[in-house]
Image (cartoon, coloured by chain):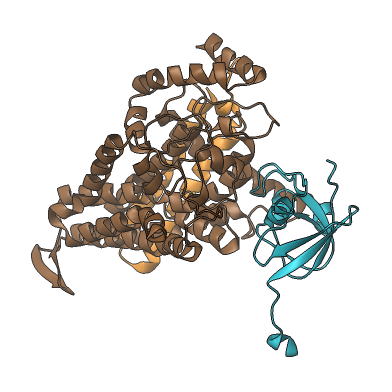
Chain colours: A orange, B brown, C cyan
Amino acid sequence: MKNIQAIFIMFIWTAFSILLLYLLEAHIYYREVVWAICIAAALLFVHMVNMAIYFNITGKEPYKWFKSQ
Amino acid sequence: MKTFYVNARYLIVPVMTIATILGIFIGNTFAWLGVILFGANTIIDTLTRGIHLRADFDDNGNSFGIKRLQYAVMYFMLPAFIFLQVILAWRLYQYTAFIPFNDFSFFGIPYQDGITGFNLIGSVLSAGLWAGLGIIYGHELSHNRKEGFLTSRLIMALSGASHFTYAHVYNHHLDLGHEDDPATAPRGRNVYTHAWLSHAGQSQYSYNLEKEKLLRQRKSFFSLSNKWILGYLYSLPSIFLFVWAGGFFGVLSLIVVWSISNFLLEALNFMGHYGLIREKGKPVEHRHSWDNDNLFTSWFFIEIGRQGDHHVRGETYFWELDDVDAPNYGIGYFSLFVLTLIPSLFRKFTQNLLDDWDRNKATSAERKIANQFSNFS
Amino acid sequence: MFSLFKKKASSYSATLSPSGKVINVKKGENLLTAALYAGIKWPYKCRVGSCGTCKCKITGGKISPEIDFSYVLNFEEMNTGYALACQTVLKTDVKVTINLKK
């Protein structure tokens, strides 16, 4: 359950970030070095936040060998 | 002669990585060379599955490995993997900039300017597979002193998995065979689920490790002393390269490269400990790891398949690792990897082996945990 | 300045207390490996610096840690000279406190 919850929030966060990059026209200016650096930093940040969302929501639950314990 | 034989046999991956780079550089259908080599290796590994050799030592018990040479090769793999990404980025640039097709030559090496979408897919898959296979050097160097450890972090960062280095040493080596180790796959889990859980779990371990360390040191979590953050920052140049070279296609390609390379890494973890059990706090012994040590796997994966010995003597150079009568799949990593891709087949293949492990190698406490799996399945 | 011309030692000694045993540690070799080679029953488990079983106290001399000890040793241990023998390379002759009966 927590897995699905986490993946849903990660999806929303990623979609929101991509939309923001699109509205900023990142897909047009990516060949400009400063833009490329900023887009790369933004994508890395999105990824790191996604990871943090996953482990803060799921905790140790996905790693329990016996779920009913 | 023996020294040459012992040292040269571990050069398969460097040579094939260079061939893959050259294939992408030459272009056209050569872009698929990395994929073809991977397939060829699977066939060779399957054909040599019955040949198992011991480590080579002279009469005085000294190994034939030349430490300086083997380390030079391992350090060399960092620029080699960087170059693999650069050459792929160059092809992405060509594709997205609509560079017209032309035949050229570079220092006598003929190459085709411009690339089709189909051959770009070949380039991406080739780069992903060889970046993934190259992770064996990231693993080996993680057990080394500062500069080796840093090189390991940088190699892993090329696949967005710099956290591996900390998680592998401080978590996996300490907790394997137990649910506290995300890299150990419990019975019944498939490789696809494991790839994500193990990747995320190792990142989580590194995240928590840093959180606790910085709390003790009274430093902010958001600092460059945070090795979890720093590890991801090491990946920034790769992301920049792919964004700049290919925009949307670049990001998509990087996702594919990272996914393949991390999948291969986690498949190795999956195969290395699947279903084996250790009581928490009890010493790690040979029986807690699977060996994959047929001739081709041993040479190709620089003896990473001698997991039983590696986990008991973690500081031992790879060329000195030996057969220690650990549980053994009897086949190599390439062949076994194909089986893992079909979970039902893999479970069927491992069932007898695990039954044998339960009967003949497990302690009574470990057998009790194993029985819990039977009750839950 | 003259230290630049000093010949570097190819090995160092580690004097263990309370046992009083002295072991020879080759340059670049870690303390645990040297101790085990000398037949000393030094407690250890993982040999990669993750479990902390081989920890000891350096009471004299200089060492070079192979990895960051702060993930395994606590704040107090870090400040009182504790080290992980499996990840300790000697820079000079050293004195070490280690309970071999563990």
**Residue B292: image x %, image y %?**
43, 36
Vertical relation: A31 (above or below) B44: below
Residue C33 is left or right of residue B179, and the answer is: right
Q: Residue furthest right?
A: C18
Residue A25 seen by the camera: no
Which residue is more in the foreground, C79 or C102? Answer: C102
Vertical relation: B290 (above or below) C57: above
Residue B37 is left or right of residue B239, and the answer is: left
Vertical relation: C46 (above or below) C79: above
Which residue is more in the foreground, B83 or B220? Answer: B83
**Residue B69: image x %, image y %?**
45, 64
Image quarter in which the N terminus of chain B is found: bottom left
Say which quarter of the image contains residue B39: top left
Residue B186 seen by the camera: yes
Q: Residue at x 68, y 54 (%)?
A: C33
Which residue is more in the foreground, B17 or A66? Answer: B17
Vertical relation: B301 (above or below) B97: above
Which residue is more in the foreground, B2 or B123? Answer: B2
Q: Which residue is drawn at 37% across and 36% down?
A: B332
Q: Which residue is drawn at 8% across and 66% down?
A: B102
**Residue B359: image x %, image y %?**
55, 16
**Residue B255: image x %, image y %?**
35, 46
Q: Residue at x 69, y 86 (%)?
A: C4
